[in-house]
Image: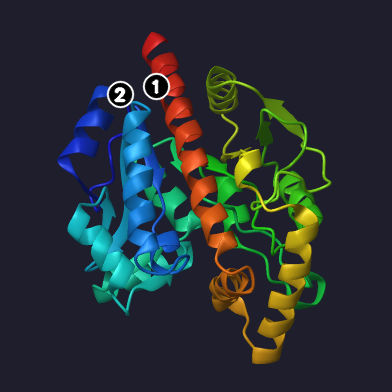
């Protein structure tokens, strides 16, 4: 068992679960503050926590509030993240800044991974990974999520990289960073809103137990870094890739025209895609997060059972 870092503030429920070796699932907070409009954001956060509990695990939504890294949040804190106008988007490089200043921060995939690892949590559920942006050969816009996956021992359950990104270059970068990518129940790498990306998955796993065995084998060998488990959106919830590509191209053109770049790019693009699709993309986004939560709870449960038996 890993002793949580003393700078973290854990809820009693999360602290007890970790002490008991019970399954815990980390959840990010950027999707609440910067990924969805109100009130859908807080409704989504509450529903995801409910799904994790239903799957037999303890949810631990992670954020920085008043400069304190929090592992597990109550309803009031979720509401604050969903509505407060001055919650910063916080990656790993930003953590010391918001902590030193005593301000609020919603954690990205990378920052959530780092804080989850410091708490001793091995499974983390998100919507989509960051990756290599389209046009990165000139902009060098590559998400810190990929670097963090190469460093931090956490399994990240997502619906693939966000479809606004360059999937081929993202997969190449993950290979370079020796990050294993497992597709859950499919041979194809999913594309967030869509089940199909046109890219084969490097590896496949079909059950939570297979994923747990992979995690154990990797870390038992001392191979540092995370595991990317990509879980396709359910067929009834997806937006076909050819439809999404037209929407994404329009959203990117609008972003370029507005001169938006850097850490503001993804929130703008996701918001613009919601507008162009008349809300269909938001509905799909919520559905895929819920689906990832079901898989994440099952994987955390299988990994905890495996750890208890060894």
* Nearer to us in this view, 73 or 196: 196
User: Residue 65 at x, y = what percent?
Assistant: 25, 65
User: Residue 188 at x, y = what percent?
Assistant: 77, 37
Q: Is residue 126 visible from the viewing direction of this image?
A: no
The image shows residue 225, relative to residue 246, as above or below, that is above
In the rendered structure, find residue 304 and report the number of the disc placed on it.
Answer: 1
Tell me the quadrant of the picture where the N terminus can be found.
Answer: top left
Q: Are marks 1 and 2 in contact (CB under 8 Å)?
A: yes
In the rendered structure, find residue 21 and report the number of the disc placed on it.
Answer: 2
Q: Residue furthest top?
A: 309
Reading the chain from its start, which is encountered first: label 1 or label 2? 2
Tell me the quadrant of the picture where the C terminus can be found.
Answer: top left
Q: Residue furthest bottom?
A: 258
Q: Secondary structure at mark 1?
A: helix
Residue at figure coordinates x 32%, y 39% from the top left: 50
Q: Is residue 294 left or right of residue 78?
A: right
* Nearer to us in this view, 308 or 206: 206
């Amino acid at each position: 068992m890993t002793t949580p870092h003393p700078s973290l503030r854990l809820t009693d429920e999360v602290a007890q679960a970790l002490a008991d070796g019970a399954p815990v699932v980390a959840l990010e907070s950027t999707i609440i503050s910067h990924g969805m409009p109100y009130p859908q954001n807080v409704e989504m956060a509450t529903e995801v926590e409910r799904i994790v509990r239903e799957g037999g695990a303890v949810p631990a939504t992670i954020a920085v509030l008043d400069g304190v890294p929090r592992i597990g949040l109550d309803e009031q804190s979720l509401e604050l993240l969903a509505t407060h106008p001055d919650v910063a988007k916080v990656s790993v490089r930003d953590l010391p800044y918001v902590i030193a200043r005593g301000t609020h921060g919603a954690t990205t995939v990378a920052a959530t991974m780092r804080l989850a690892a410091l708490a001793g949590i091995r499974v983390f559920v998100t919507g989509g990974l960051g990756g290599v942006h389209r046009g990165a050969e000139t902009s060098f816009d590559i998400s810190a999520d990929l670097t963090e996956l190469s460093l931090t021992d956490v399994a990240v359950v997502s619906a693939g990289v966000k479809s606004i990104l360059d999937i081929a270059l993202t997969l190449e970068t993950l290979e370079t960073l020796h990050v294993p990518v497992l597709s859950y129940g499919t041979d194809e790498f999913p594309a967030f809103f869509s089940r199909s990306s046109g890219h084969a998955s490097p590896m496949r796993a079909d059950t939570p137990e297979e994923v747990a065995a992979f995690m154990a084998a990797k870390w038992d060998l001392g191979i540092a870094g995370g595991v990317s488990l990509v879980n396709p959106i359910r067929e009834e919830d997806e937006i076909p890739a050819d439809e999404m590509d037209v929407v994404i191209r329009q959203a990117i053109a609008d972003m370029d025209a507005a001169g938006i770049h850097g850490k503001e790019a993804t929130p703008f693009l996701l918001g613009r895609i919601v507008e162009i699709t008349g809300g269909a993309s938001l509905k799909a986004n919520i559905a895929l997060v819920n689906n990832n939560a079901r898989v994440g709870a099952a994987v955390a449960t299988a990994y905890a059972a495996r750890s208890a038996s060894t």
